[in-house]
Amino acid sequence: MKRFLTVGCVAAVLAATCIASAVATLVMGLIANYPLALAPGMGINAYFTFTVVMQMKVPWQTALGAVFISGLVFFVLTAGLSGTRSNPHPPGLTIR
């Protein structure tokens, strides 16, 4: 079986994941005023890489499309509810 990830590729993926997590966390804290770390949400990358693509043999383009569509569905469902739901964050968590 051909190796899926080389050492250089693993380092590049690790760096890209760290940078994406840092940027998302900074945006969440500075723009949205909710200083929450968003790195745990990156676990879906490992799930799709190792389970869906490598074990289930789904093409990576299809898996990436599924992640994109699920993100759109989540956005549409939550964007309409933002004004109707209660604030789940304690007042001390927001930066004003």
Image (cartoon, rainbow, N blue to C red):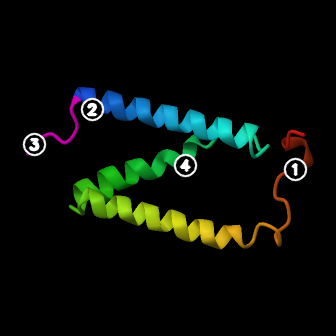
Q: What is the three-letter code of the residue carrying label 4?
A: Gly
Tell me if label 3 and label 2 are in contact, CB under 8 Å. no
Q: What is the three-letter code of the residue carrying label 1?
A: Pro
Q: CA distance from mark 1 to mark 4?
A: 21 Å
**3 or 1: tag closer to the N-terminus:** 3
Tell me if label 1 and label 2 are in contact, CB under 8 Å. no
Q: CA distance from mark 3 to mark 2?
A: 14 Å
| Quarter location, residue 58 | bottom left
The quarter of the rendered structure image containing the N terminus is top left
Residue 69 position within the rendered picture, expressed as x and y whole percent measured from the top left:
46, 67
**1 or 2: tag closer to the N-terminus:** 2
The quarter of the rendered structure image containing the C terminus is top right
At a point 74% along the width and 37% down the height, the residue shown is 30
Look at mark 2 in the image and give the residue it sits on: 9
Q: Identify which residue, 54 or 77, lies in the foreground.
A: 77
Look at mark 4 in the image and give the residue it sits on: 41
Q: What is the three-letter code of the residue carrying label 2?
A: Cys
Q: Residues within 10 Å of mark 3 (few under 14, many from 20)?
A: few
Foreground label between 3 and 2: 2
* Residue 36 visible from this viewpoint: no
Tag 1, which secondary structure? Answer: loop
Q: Which residues are magenta?
A: 1-6
Look at mark 1 in the image and give the residue it sits on: 90
Tag 2, which secondary structure? Answer: helix
| Horizontal side of residue 70 vs 34, given as left or right | left
